Image (cartoon, rainbow, N blue to C red):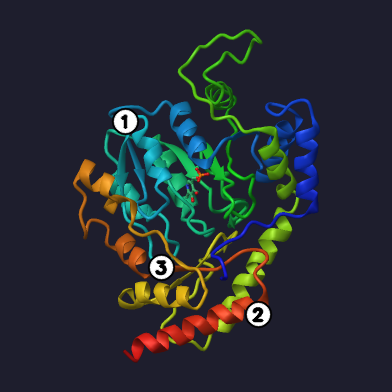
Amino acid sequence: MIPLSQPDIDDRDRQAVMAAMQSPTLSGGPFLRQFEEEFARRTGRKYALAVSSGTAALHLGVRALGLSAGDEVITTPFSFIASANCLLYESVRPVFVDVEADTYGLDPDLVAAAITPSTRAVLPVHVFGQPCKIADIGTLCQSHGLVMIEDACEALLAGTGDRLVGSFGDVAVYGFYPNKQITSGEGGMLTTDSEEIYRKVKSLRNQGRDIETDEIRQIALGYNYRMSEINAALGGSQLQRINEIKALRKQILERYNQLFAGVAGIGLPSVVGNNDPSWFLYVVRVHADVRDELIQRLAMRGIQTKAYFSPPIHLQPYYRNKFGFSEGDFPVSERLSRECLALPFYNGLSSSDQERVVEGVSKSLGEIQGM
Ligand SMILES: Cc1ncc(COP(=O)(O)O)c(C=O)c1O
């Protein structure tokens, strides 16, 4: 079976984890501080706080920005569920607007049209590693006095124009699940330039403790969203290789695109505008009528693939029941969710396995068309 994704763990990663295991502190020690400092440096922000997941980072972003019941946050339905769930945790209302068909990210014109007196923030997501129109969304936020949580979980060190993604939001968040560009096993990071937000998040991730004292003094309702030294050691070690990893994934993506050049019926990923993506997935588009049959046939050929993001968030049963969403509410997101297909994509994917995938897709499509 050629898997959809696979972590890339090398000897340096194993040594870092062993060193963390042998140190006297398994939590809140030097590996965490190093990971955070290096992450802040590479993403160009003043502060970085490691947490237990990308979802935890999103939740703490919502809390630290003081968003609460009655507030509206404009966000995308074409995303991983956590980017909307984090709002529901605090009874904040997600106001979905549709995405662009090329970046798969929020359409700035639709964001502008959705702003009401209750809007407090925008939560854009850079999907699959391709930056959305974040500069335009940033300008909108500034002119309307809105804050921004930038979900860069899938786009570590992607750029657009002369800026990195994750440098636009009042807070930006990242995730290190094993299918991501770098992994810490499980884990996430929140970055910001605001000392106030930094202090709040540092307290909230550790039960809401007062960070000024070693005494146990709880000053807010917090959580255990801490990252262990073992996870931080792995994340910190992987981060050292991020530039190579980004280049390697670009190379693998371009090779796929070349191999697919002669295959009819496949839409290939491409760089939009002046973006510099940090590829998370290799997502192609196929006709909605063939997509699910294609997944089945590829599985029979030993090739794991996945419909992404399917269904979009607003059509997940929980959201349908809670808000009454239905088909047709966000047509671009819905079309993408019927057409997008993620193929195997990871650092260690060999050229011969890429050829097998392309041949498998081509043959399967031929079989379906001949049916
Ligand atoms: C866009 C997006 N947001 C948030 C998350 C949540 O991250 P985690 O799975 O680490 O909680 C993910 C990743 O899985 C993601 O892809």
Res 91 label: 1
Q: Nearer the viewer, mark 2 or mark 3?
A: 2
Task: Name the N-terminal-most of marks 2 and 1.
Answer: 1
Please tell me whether residue 120 is drawn above or below residue 320 in the rendered image.
Answer: above
In percent of width and height, residue 233 lies at 72, 40
In percent of width and height, residue 229 lies at 70, 33
Residue closer to the observer: 366 or 250: 366
3D distance between C-alphas at marks 2 and 3: 24 Å
Q: Is residue 58 left or right of residue 166?
A: left
Residue under numbered circle 3: 340
Q: Is mark 3 within 8 Å of ligand 1?
A: no
3D distance between C-alphas at marks 2 and 1: 49 Å
Residue under numbered circle 2: 352
As drawn, the residue found furthest toward the bottom would be: 370
The reply to whether the C-beta atoms of the residues labelled 2 and 3 are less than 8 Å apart is: no
The reply to whether the C-beta atoms of the residues labelled 1 and 3 are less than 8 Å apart is: no
- Residue 58 at least partly seen: yes
